[in-house]
Image: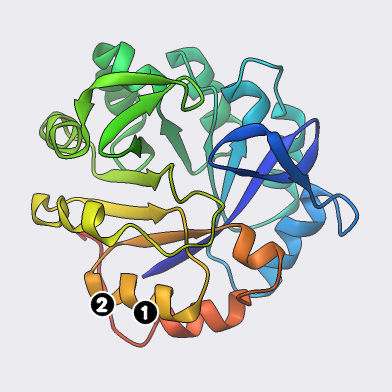
Amino acid sequence: MLVIPAIDLMNGKVVRLLRGDPKSARSYAHIGDPVDFARMWEAEGARMIHIVDLDAALGLGENINVIGEIIRSTKVQIQVGGGIRSVERAGQLINAGASRIVLGSLAFRSMESVRAILEMFGDERVVVALDHLNGRVMIDGWREPTKMVLREAAKTFSEMGVKFFLVTSIERDGMMAGPDIKSLSSILDLNINIIASGGVSSLDDIETLRDLGVYGVILGRALYEGSISLREALKAAKKQDYRACGE
């Protein structure tokens, strides 16, 4: 199972939000800048880093210069999400060196754009975000509900050719209350690569997700506040071999 540390950006600084609420932003600028964190996670063994441009997601600006600096300063794969609302923006990030891009609002507002991005860049470069609140998929910085529930959305995009899905429990995001196993279990049979996000706070959580059979897990607040070390998480994730669907 892939363990992916998160770097959430707001005003060029690393922050964490609780349940996506910008008013709850907790800054970690006193520990280091985004490049410092990226280099640290790389040194500790991360194979991929997940970057979220919160300003872009919330319509407050963007952090593309910082993202570019992280890409240039590390050798790990970089997965980028937040505010990718056009095919052009997706291409801009991939051309800047992003290994994968995460599509949220765009995917639900324009499925044709998802098809175009898949055709242009291939299915290894595209992740669809299924951010859900009580099963309902949310978009626009988690402020607007879609007409789709989690399983329906996963099935729809999987049939379109999407291989990777970032599944975030909004209710648990940043709360360190454990992952939403029930929701994740409800889509495991779809033969998709699930990246679980939200609530992970212990090595037991890592082992539970590993045994469940998900492809990857995003770690945020638990890393930044010392509840889990990345090295320990990587060891816990390796105790059972796992291969991505289709690989």
Residue 68, by quadrant, is top right
Q: Is residue 229 above or below residue 117?
A: below
- 60 or 70, which lies in front? 60
Q: Are marks 1 and 2 in contact (CB under 8 Å)?
A: yes
Q: Label for residue 207?
A: 1
* 154 with respect to 46 (left or right): left
Name the residue rendered at 80%, 30% in the picture. Answer: 11
Q: Residues within 10 Å of mark 2 (few under 14, many from 20)?
A: some
Disc 1 packing (10 Å; few <14; some 14–19; many ≥20)? some
Q: Amino acid at mark 2?
A: Asp
**Residue assigned mark 2:** 211
Q: Alpha carbon of mark 1 to alpha carbon of mark 2: how far?
A: 6 Å
Q: Label 1's element?
A: helix
Residue at screen point 79% across, 51% down: 35
| Quadrant the C terminus occupies | bottom left
Q: Amino acid at mark 1?
A: Glu
Kindly indicate the quadrant of the structure image that contains residue 53. Answer: top right
